[in-house]
Structures are given as C-alpha cells and as structure tokens.
Amino acid sequence: MRYSIAGLALLAGLTVAVDPVEVRGQDFVNSVSGDRFVVIGVDYQPGGQGAISATNDRDVLSDPEACTRDAALMQSLGVNTIRSYNVDPTLNHDECMSIFNGVGIYVILDVNTPLYGQHIDRSNPGSTYTRDYMEHVFTVIEAFKGYPNLLGFFGGNEIINDLETADDNPPYMRAVQRDMKDYIASRADRPIPVGYSAADVREFTEDTYHYLACDNGDSSASDFFGLNSYSWCGSESSFETAEYDVLVEMFSNASIPVFFSEYGCNDPSPRVFEEVEALYSPQMTVMSGGLVYEWSQEDNNYGLVNISSDGSARLRSDYNSLMEQYSRINITLLEASNDTATSITAPRCSSDLIEADDFSDEFDIPSRPSGVDALISSGISSAPTGSLVSVTATAVALPVYGVDGASMSNLAITVTSEANRPVGTASRTSSRTSSRSGSASGSSTASGASATQSGAAHRMSGAVALALGAAALAL
C-alpha cells in the first residue's frame, strides 16, 4: 500500500498526540492507560480580559510564537494542564493547541467571554440565556472539540458568588451544561467533560457542588467541579488553618472530580506555594490537583512570568518557588487508580441536599431557548473545526530571561506523546520521599529555570516519533 508524503506526516503525527482524558467517578483518567490524571496546572490568560475584544485579531491560543515560549517554560516547570478563560472561536488555534499537545499539556477552556452576548450575566441570567449565546458556546465547542488535549469546558465561572445570586442562577448553570453536553454528544466524536468553576464561599460551597453534581434524570449535571480557593496564605498557614481538612471531608464522597480551578494566595508576596505539598499529598487524594493563578503578571500581582509588549518574558521568583514545590510531588501516588473513587455515583437531586436557606433547591431546569434544538441537531456549519498539525518550529524565537535578567538562550520545546510532569518525580514511591527529597532542577541556577532538556529523558523527540510513525506505516 502506498502513502503520500503528506499522508505519512499526518498519520505519523498522530503517534505524538496525547491520550484524551475522561471522567470516571471521582477521578480524571487517561482513556488509554487507565492511569489517574491529576491536574498540575496554571491559569493561562496573558493580557487578562483585555486580551480579547471585538477588534482583536488574535487570542491567547492563536499566537504560535507566544505559545512556544510559554509551552517551553511550562514544560520545564512541570505543568500538565492550563486553563484559558477567553477565546475567539472564529480564529485558528491549530498551531497553539498542537504546541501544547506536543509538550504534554492539556487545556481546560471557558466558553464565555466578557463581550456582549457571550456570557451569562449573573445579575440577570434569564435575559442572557438566549439562542445567540448558545450559538457562541457551540461555536467554541466546534472550534476545539477535535483536539485530543482538550480536557474539558467550563460552562461558567463564579456565576453563583453570593447569596443574592444563589437563588436564581443555579438552574441556568445546569441548563447551559445540559445544552453543552447534548451538543457534544450529538456533534463530537468523543465525550468531552463539562464543568463549573465555583467561588469558594464556604457558606454555600457544598450547596453549589450538590446542586450542580446531583442526578436530575437528564444531562444537566456537572462532569467536574472546579473551586477558586485562596484560603492558604503565607508560611503561617497550614492544612487546618486553610481548612483543607474541611474540603477533604466535604468532597470525600464526591461523585465527580473536584480540583482547584484557581489557587495561590499572593499575600504575602512573593509566594512560596507551601500549599502545593498539601494539595498533592496522601491527605488530599480526594482532590484532583489544581491550577495556580496565574501565568502572566497582570495588575492584580499573581504572575509567575512578566511578559512585555515586545513578546519577551522574564521569570519571577514565584516561578522558581513553584518549580521547587512541584519537584516534591509524588506522581506515582497520584497516578494510582482508585476503584472506590471511580465507583461513587451521584445522589438523586433533592431539596434535602441543600442546606443554605437562600440557595435554590428547585431542580426545574429552564427549557432551551427557541432554535437551540436545531443548532444541536444540525451543528454550527460556519464554525472552524480545529485539528492537530505538525509542530516543526520547536525553538523559542522570543527573548526569555531568568529572574536575575540573564538571557535563557537555546530554549526549546521537547515533543512528547505523554502528559508532562515535574522534573524528577516519575520514580518516587513514598510520600516521605515525595515531601523531603529531590531538588527543583533549575530553580537554583543563575537563569532561574532549568533547560528543557533536563528531566526529559522519558520524553520522545518529535523527530524520533515521526520516524517511528513512518516506519510503522512502511511495515
């Protein structure tokens, strides 16, 4: 059988695609190996909300040079997941998504933007749950459903953030999730999880989870639950004072994965990230990891990296501190499957699940707006559907500097076929070893980051992978 050169490149390229992640009970799981997948990630939205507007011609996942720069630094750091809040689904994201796939990084994507008609207004959800809004959401799904490193979608972020919004808004979140999941079931070739990112307001955090995760006899339940939590602040905090023990008890019988969709208190600053050891410890295996807020330094002072208008980047000391903490993670412990966790099922929706007086206990989900059923059955024909492309430019073209200002030359990504992981963690087998030994490679160097080659012995280069793919086809 003969194959064209283009066909060889395409099929060989598939050999370096990461395995999709799926939900099994309380865990994210690699759909091929069955290993548990734990989020070791960072929130990624350089430029903040201002990075997307009606007049922009690019978004955070459509600039290949910037994506290569950040992917190389994240690969060294040990990140396996990013969350991006705002994208323009009409743009082409093939190169950036392929770059992040190439370094073993998954993407969780919010479907909303700050633009008019592209989000649920928490102050008036009924007026913004419209056909046009759902068309935008479905267009985002169409644009990203073809990427194997798409971990899932957030249908909402802190739409319920106080008792005033806890009465009217929960049913609309379930309605949006229902519509998204029905569209994915109809139009995608694999299950793609849909979830919610919640404000950690302890007065009703548990109610938010129970409302969104219970079984209502339809498709409206969350597939995962993210929590934006900043309770661990500074070196004086602890597992108990940050109330991580409360969260463990709260989610011990969770029927879906629960993780921090944002964490990393910045008071005091610079951060030392001592909560990382707790989050990835045996005490918190009920949680599926977390996403540090955030990659780039913005006005709110949470950045790991300073990014200048010319595209150059300079590491902040927070990057080094996080790398050091990541180096202590016991990956062997985290990846072990848990049959008990994956067999937990959601309770039937009932007002008995809700404790706060002002939180909605009604599970009569709003009907779809007129025309949405037709969109689900026919799809968004005008939407571009993304797919992986070959990653040929692996060198970082933009200037990158360490914490001390020294140039980090020869920075490049290393293409792999598996999820990225922190340096030196693969062979650790005990929690004592995990918490006490190992060094954060590169965090003690003058430049402030390791070369991407260090700790990458388990990774397969793009050239090797392509060669193996071509050989397999020849056979």
Image (tube, rainbow, N blue to C red):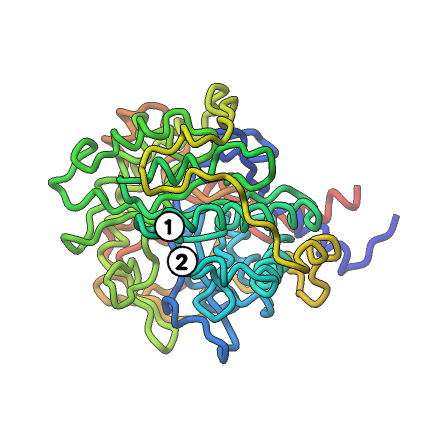
Residue extending farthest to the right is 1
Q: Is residue 335 left or right of residue 293?
A: right
Q: Position of residue 367 (x, y in %)?
A: 60, 50
Q: Residue at x 31, y 38 (%)?
A: 357
Quadrant where the C terminus sits is top right
Could you say which disc has been placed on residue 160 in the image?
1
Q: Is residue 150 left or right of residue 308?
A: right
Q: Element under label 1?
A: loop
Tell me if mark 2 has few (under 14), some (14-19) or many (20+) residues whose alpha carbon lies within 10 angstroms of its own.
many
Decide if residue 324 is in sight here. yes
Give the amino acid type for the residue marked by disc 2 in the picture: Arg
Q: Position of residue 462 (x, y in %)?
A: 58, 52
* Residue matched to label 2: 122
Q: Residue at x 26, y 49 (%)?
A: 264
Decide if residue 105 is in sight here. no
Mark 2 and mark 1 residues within 8 Å of each other at the beta carbon? yes
Q: Is residue 397 shown above or below 440?
A: below
Q: Residue at x 44, y 45 (%)?
A: 456
- CA gap, disc 2 and disc 1: 7 Å
Residue extending farthest to the left is 236
| Nearer the observer, 176 or 460 | 176
| Nearer the observer, 42 or 379 | 379
Residue extending farthest to the bottom is 55
Q: Position of residue 259 (x, y in %)?
A: 39, 39
